[in-house]
Image (cartoon, rainbow, N blue to C red):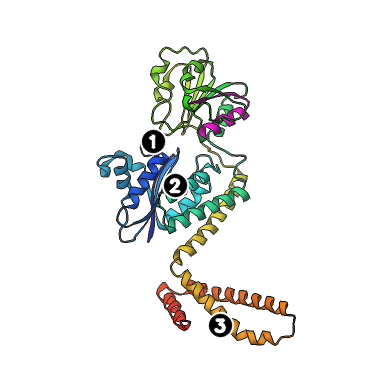
Amino acid sequence: MSISMIGIDHNKAPVDIRAMFSFTKKNAGQAMERLKSQDGMCGCVILSTCNRLEIWASHEEEIPPALYEALCDLKEIKDPDHSYEKQYFVHRCGEEAVEHLFYLTSGLKSQILGEDQILTQVKEALSLARECYAADGVLEVLFRMAVTAGKKIKTEVPLSHGNPSVIHQAIQYLREHGCEISGKTCMVIGNGEMGKVAAQTLREAGANVTVTVRQYRSGIVNIPLGCERINYGERMEFLPCCDLVVSATASPNYTLREELFETLSLSKPLILIDLAVPRDIEPSLGERENITLYDMDSFRMEETSEKLSRNLEAAGKIVREQMEEFRIWYEGRTVIPRIQEIREEAVRDFHVRIEKIIKHTPMESADREELQKTIDKAAGKVINKMMFGLKDFLNEEAFLECVAGLEKLYEN
């Protein structure tokens, strides 16, 4: 069995290219079900966020999947072999793919270094794959161990302060360019996860924030504390009052279109921030007088401080340790249950042989039982060390022969 992935992200592809290949939760579930049915496919996971799209597959070595072609088929893109978009994709397999996922989940490949939203997104991708019965044992363990590495880094290595996100970076960027958010009138279009983060962050920065809510949901949807709400249909009436508008929805259509501004009069400069993939705001609006438009790719970290460099090295050490654990599991996933059975049989054998000696050792009964448990535990550790030591020093064929011989030894 092998592990492969293809991916497209903010480092290589602009937002419009990423939008072509993005999935909603519902579409991702349907796509994984189709992918899993392909010949040679053992399991798959789709990770789709604003910054990236990745398809992960565990598959038979003899039948490597054509993941890009499969993706184009899912997206109904014709002639994938000659498509312009192919240049933006990266294909990884084996150890390179595993390394990528560990570093990604740890926030070390994010647009904002150390942000922990990707950790949640990876967990949710695995959860959805489970619901669709798409993830097999290999991807299950790989994704879980990558999440473990991410959690450990989040706890032990301070790569960032608070809970960074694109909106945090946007506010920092605007401040550095002379635009203070405190006291400004802001509107956030969208009340999903990213919209709520945006609204809360702007509110914490001192802005007066209004959130749009779809009319049929307006009575039951919670919005961040301290924010006002209006119906989505009233957004254009409120917009002239705003200094800044953030749009972050999962809509396939523009929330702010050129035609909606034809009769709109703006008496002051307006900043528009589009945090959606596909885009929420029609790009041509950025060419209008008094309007400045930013999208997901507008805010990037360029500098790395000395302290951050040290923390990155510490985070890398954690990643490498967790990757080694996965490598040991992956390489021994078929033989480990056999080793465990041999260990149990050997410990029982040793227990019987030493029982008579312990039985005649002068001590309290409770102490004798505790001593026997300690000896059994120590014996198990020694046997584990011997077995896995052999695995490190022998080639696979010789090691499997040793395992088979020990199994025969304890057959009866």
Residue in the foreground of this view, choosing between 291 and 201:
201
Q: Is residue 356 visible?
A: yes
Please tell me how crowded label 2 is: few (under 14), some (14-19), or many (20+) other residues with Cα within 10 Å: many
Q: Nearer the viewer, mark 3 or mark 1?
A: 3
Instruction: Look at label 1 and name its amino acid.
Output: Ala
Q: Earlier in the sequence, mark 3 or mark 1?
A: 1
Residue corresponding to mark 1: 19
Which element is circle 1 on?
helix
- Marks 3 and 1 sit apart, C-alpha to C-alpha, by 62 Å
Instruction: Look at label 2 and name its amino acid.
Output: Leu
Residue in the foreground of this view, choosing between 123 and 100:
123
Residue corresponding to mark 2: 128
Q: Earlier in the sequence, mark 1 or mark 2?
A: 1
Residue corresponding to mark 3: 349
Q: Is residue 57 visible?
A: no
Q: Residue furthest left?
A: 79
How far across and down, in percent of the image, does residue 136 sit?
A: 41, 56
Task: Locate residue 387 relative to residue 97 in the image: left or right.
Answer: right
- Does the magenta run of residues contain 113? no
Q: Earlier in the sequence, mark 2 or mark 3?
A: 2
Residue in the foreground of this view, choosing between 316 and 377:
377
Which element is circle 2 on?
helix
Instruction: Look at label 3 and name its amino acid.
Output: Asp
Please tell me how crowded label 3 is: few (under 14), some (14-19), or many (20+) other residues with Cα within 10 Å: few
What residue is rendered at 27% in x and 43% in y?
Answer: 80
114 above or below 344? above
